[in-house]
Image (cartoon, rainbow, N blue to C red):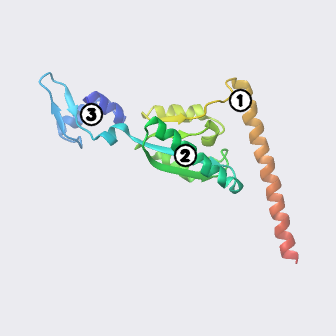
Amino acid sequence: MKLSDYAKTKGISYKTAWRMYKAGKIPHPTEQLPTGSIIVYTNQEEQQGKTAIYARVSSYDQKEDLKRQVQRLRDFCANQGLSITQEITEIGSALNGKRKKLLRILKDSSITTLVVEHRDRLTRFGFEYLEASLRATNRNILVINDMECKDDLVQDMIDVLTSFCAHLYGRRSAKRRAKKALEACQT
């Protein structure tokens, strides 16, 4: 690949890549053609990047749904010719911003493609921000079932109601657990 393309894939400027080439700090074989173009020879897997699938459900009751979701993601990747390097599954709310496994793959710059079934499997709010920040580093998110509501106002209302319901159900669940714990202590 040309040095300019190499710079883009690494998220650095062309000048920085050129300085690295001059200093011999590019960790791949390089060649300068008679035309002056600099070619960087990288292996095919590194050029394509890594693909990870991410599946999430909200509660342990949905563990079977999680398995089916992973299988659908595998099938999609096979049909698209994508080779999966990581499979990440999580059980937890999409409203929780502290999902360790999701944060780990978002920090891993070697993963260039993240495949999810629905946008809300990744996050309830701010999907566009997440997508834009990944695109800024030459990474992308593939949503295999993007049959979301396209009207922003309707989608925002659905997201807010979903958030309120999750909060309400969380409270009820916490009350039930506290009540059972008190009953267990009293007997």
For the N terminus, the image quarter is top left
**Residue kind at label 1, given as amino acid type:** Gln
C-alpha distance separating marks 2 and 3: 32 Å
Q: What crowding class fits label 1: few (fewer than 14 Cα within 10 Å), some (14-19), or many (20 or more)?
A: some
Q: 124 or 75: which is nearer to us?
A: 75
Residue behind mark 2: 54
Q: What crowding class fits label 3: few (fewer than 14 Cα within 10 Å), some (14-19), or many (20 or more)?
A: many
Is residue 187 rendered to the left or right of residue 17?
A: right
C-alpha distance separating marks 3 and 1: 43 Å
Q: Are marks 3 and 1 in contact (CB under 8 Å)?
A: no
Residue behind mark 3: 17
Residue behind mark 1: 155
Q: Are marks 2 and 3 in contact (CB under 8 Å)?
A: no
Q: What crowding class fits label 2: few (fewer than 14 Cα within 10 Å), some (14-19), or many (20 or more)?
A: many
**Residue kind at label 2, given as amino acid type:** Tyr
Of callouts 2 and 1, which one flags the residue occurring earlier in the amino acid sequence?
A: 2
Question: Could you say where residue 159 lies in the image, as x and y percent from the top left?
Answer: 72, 35
Residue 87 visible here? yes
Element at label 3: helix
Element at label 2: strand
Instruction: Identify which residue is drawn at 55% across, 36% down.
Output: 130
Question: Could you say where residue 71 lies in the image, as x and y percent from the top left?
Answer: 56, 47
Of callouts 2 and 3, which one flags the residue occurring earlier in the amino acid sequence?
A: 3
Element at label 1: helix
Q: 85 or 80: which is nearer to us?
A: 80
Question: Could you say where residue 90 lies in the image, as x and y percent from the top left?
Answer: 60, 52
